[in-house]
């Protein structure tokens, strides 16, 4: 039986071409900007072969996505390859659809693998369940070379001995009972079918290794002088069912697949010593290791179930997170960079990738996630028209359609919730309406529900009660004391009476801006006419008056159209709402203004009469 056990790693067939070389990888950003020292060093070391090796016992979450992303970025940044390997040897805990969901989630996030179960490669198969014969061969090699031994202890025996040791205050480590069974006896019992596992015979002292993040790492426990309790750290390599444990399969696969860098969570750091012991036993050169800290919540506790189990489906479908928002967010969890902004596309992440990972654990803040969502939405809005070259940048798919879905679902349950929107014809009219709102306020987009709430005035007209409770005062501020500060509502509304003369075909942002400017100019000229003779012609005073009128007019329009709520520029809001709706809202607001003026006049008159 021929084993691939030489120190030289195998080479693949020259006929196979990786995915990125086939032109299916993403475009690279320009490398003209200076890179950090860490980024330059990574590229100096040459092409890296990295891998992501998930177990299909659950779905992709933040921690596992971060591991995949870090490995992907290092491979892409160095011109190497990124492999996907499915570690499915734990058959009892396998979730039926986890593997397929894994492919979908990684592809959605923009992480493409060059070799893997569904696309092949020169080092396949890429599912551990299809490589069991290989693991058994390597386990037997360690057995016959004296670096491993068979253990015939039953689970019950091990459990009883562990309890006995615990009662004596001793650690529950294995006592190496079966390590002293003669080889002939061990072979004979195995041939007869006695159930057994194969354990690694650990060295008296584990190898010291240099972690790319933490530096030199030494095993705390030194077995050079064996303690009296006779406890041994001999991990199981091959289980009774013939399937390998993580330790054996991981080492064999990483070597056989020519992996150069292993980037994984710090929870695996304690296992690295065992893995290095196996590399030495096989006579292989190990890859380089980089361990990244755990993800913690704001209380510096391990992520709660709410965050840790946040699957890609929930983030994508329920939260409406964009792919690059998520990869940008995840990349910042434990990675240091010298880029001026934290807002980075996948191209930016590849361009600036390095192994400068943060020592220690990282706190996850969802506020950062929403901040990045807004920034990427604004970036995508600036990339168009008409369609972005990258589908993952398409705001119509990422935001417009999810908003339409939310609105239509709401309408079916609450028909009166969005009356203005519901009055629009279904189909293209509603699509264009929502699309215009998204483009106008993209810099504030987070998710459909929050975005609709923020821009509610587009879908629901302000009521008379709402306008009255937030009444706008027609008053100039920060102007000379000898000018009229409070302007009668009836006089002020005269400036707006000609808006109805703008025809439907001319109802656009430029024309509306010009109309608003003309109101500001007319009002300014009226007030400037009140200045004393010696003050007239003063550019500073005239600029002050014009600024006050601009603030008054824009503020009034915002109050009349949207009850004073924050949002895009007033002329843009009016363009989106359309001529008919704007005329109706301005008319309703004018009536509220005149009613308030009449009421104030009555109150003032009553006060005068009472004084008499």
Image: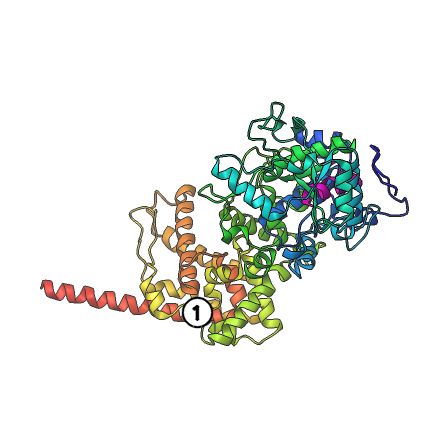
User: Which residue is rendered at x = 12% and y = 66% of the image?
Assistant: 609
Q: Nearer the viewer, residue 591 or 500?
A: 591
Residue 508: give x, y in percent of width and height.
57, 63
Q: Position of residue 318 (x, y in %)?
A: 55, 61
Mark 1 secondary-structure assignment: loop
Q: Nearer the viewer, residue 83 or 491?
A: 83
For residue 7, what is the image quadrant?
A: top right
Q: Is residue 257 magenta?
A: yes
Q: Is residue 108 above or below residue 500?
A: above
- From which residue to which does the magenta span run? 245-260
Q: Looking at this view, is 221 or 355 the one in front? A: 221
- Residue underneath mark 1: 461
State which quadrant residue 162 falls in. top right
The answer to whether residue 287 is seen in the rendering is no
- Residue at x 81% of width, y 49% of height: 124
Q: Residues within 10 Å of mark 1 (few under 14, many from 20)?
A: many
Count of labels in the image: 1
Q: Quadrant of the C terminus?
A: bottom left
Question: Residue 476 at x, y = what percent?
Answer: 34, 53
Reply yes or no: does residue 347 show up in magenta.
no
Residue 30: percent from left, percent from top: 72, 39
Of residue 196 and residue 518, the one placed in the foreground of this image is 196
Is the image coloured rainbow, by chain, by secondary structure, or in one colour? Answer: rainbow
Compared across the picture, whether 609 is left or right of 472 comes to: left
């Amino acid at each position: 039986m021929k084993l691939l056990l030489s120190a030289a790693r195998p080479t693949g067939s020259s006929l196979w071409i990786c995915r990125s070389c086939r032109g299916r990888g993403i475009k690279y950003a320009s490398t003209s900007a200076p890179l950090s020292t860490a980024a330059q060093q990574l590229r100096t070391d040459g092409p890296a072969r990295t891998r992501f090796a998930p177990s299909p016992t659950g779905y992709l979450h933040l921690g596992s996505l971060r591991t995949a992303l870090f490995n992907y970025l290092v491979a892409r940044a160095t011109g190497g390859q990124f492999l996907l390997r499915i570690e499915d040897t734990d058959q009892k805990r396998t979730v039926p659809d986890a593997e397929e969901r894994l492919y979908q989630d990684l592809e959605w996030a923009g992480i493409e693998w060059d070799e893997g179960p569904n696309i092949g490669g020169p080092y396949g198969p890429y599912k551990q369940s299809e490589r069991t014969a290989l693991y058994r061969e390597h386990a037997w090699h360690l057995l016959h070379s004296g670096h491993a031994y068979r253990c015939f202890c039953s689970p019950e025996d091990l459990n009883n001995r562990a309890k006995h040791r615990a009662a004596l205050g001793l650690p529950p480590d294995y006592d190496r009972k079966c390590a002293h069974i003669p080889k002939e006896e061990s072979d004979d019992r195995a041939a007869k079918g006695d159930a057994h596992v194969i354990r690694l015979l650990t060295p008296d002292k584990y190898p010291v290794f240099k972690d790319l993040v933490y530096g030199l790492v030494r095993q705390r426990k030194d077995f050079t002088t064996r303690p009296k309790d006779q406890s041994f750290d001999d991990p199981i390599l091959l289980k009774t069912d013939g399937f390998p444990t993580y330790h054996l399969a991981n080492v064999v696969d990483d070597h056989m697949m020519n992996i150069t860098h292993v980037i994984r969570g710090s929870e695996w750091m304690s296992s690295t010593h065992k893995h290095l012991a196996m590399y030495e036993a096989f006579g292989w050169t190990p890859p380089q290791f980089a361990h990244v800290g755990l993800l913690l919540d704001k209380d510096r506790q391990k992520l709660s179930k709410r965050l840790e189990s946040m699957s890609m489906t929930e983030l994508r479908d329920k939260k409406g997170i964009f792919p690059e928002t998520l990869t940008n967010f995840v990349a910042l969890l434990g990675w240091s960079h010298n880029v001026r902004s934290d807002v980075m596309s996948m191209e930016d992440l590849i361009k600036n990738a390095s192994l400068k990972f943060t020592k220690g654990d990282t706190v996850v803040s969802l506020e950062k996630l929403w901040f990045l969502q807004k920034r990427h939405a604004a970036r995508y809005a600036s990339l168009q028209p008409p369609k972005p070259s990258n589908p993952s940048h398409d705001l119509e798919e990422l935001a417009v359609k999810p908003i339409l879905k939310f609105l239509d679902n709401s309408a079916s349950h609450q028909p009166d919730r969005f009356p203005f929107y519901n009055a629009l014809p279904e189909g293209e009219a509603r699509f264009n309406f929502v699309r215009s709102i998204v483009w106008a306020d993209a810099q504030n987009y987070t998710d459909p529900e929050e975005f609709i709430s923020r821009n509610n005035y587009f879908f629901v007209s302000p009521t008379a009660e709402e306008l009255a409770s937030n009444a706008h005062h027609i008053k100039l501020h920060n102007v000379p004391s000898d000018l009229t500060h409070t302007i009668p509502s009836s006089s002020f509304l005269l400036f707006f009476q000609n808006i109805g003369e703008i025809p439907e075909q001319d109802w656009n942002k430029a024309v509306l801006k010009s109309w608003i400017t003309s109101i500001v100019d007319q009002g300014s000229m009226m007030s400037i006419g009140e200045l004393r003779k010696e003050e007239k012609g003063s550019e500073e005073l005239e600029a002050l008056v014009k600024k006050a009128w601009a603030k008054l007019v824009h503020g009034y329009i915002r109050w009349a159209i949207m009850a004073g709520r924050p949002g895009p520029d007033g002329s843009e809001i009016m363009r989106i709402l359309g001529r008919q709706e704007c005329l109706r809202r301005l008319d309703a607001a004018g009536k509220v203004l005149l009613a308030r003026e009449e009421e104030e006049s009555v109150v003032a008159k009553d006060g005068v009469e009472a004084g008499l």
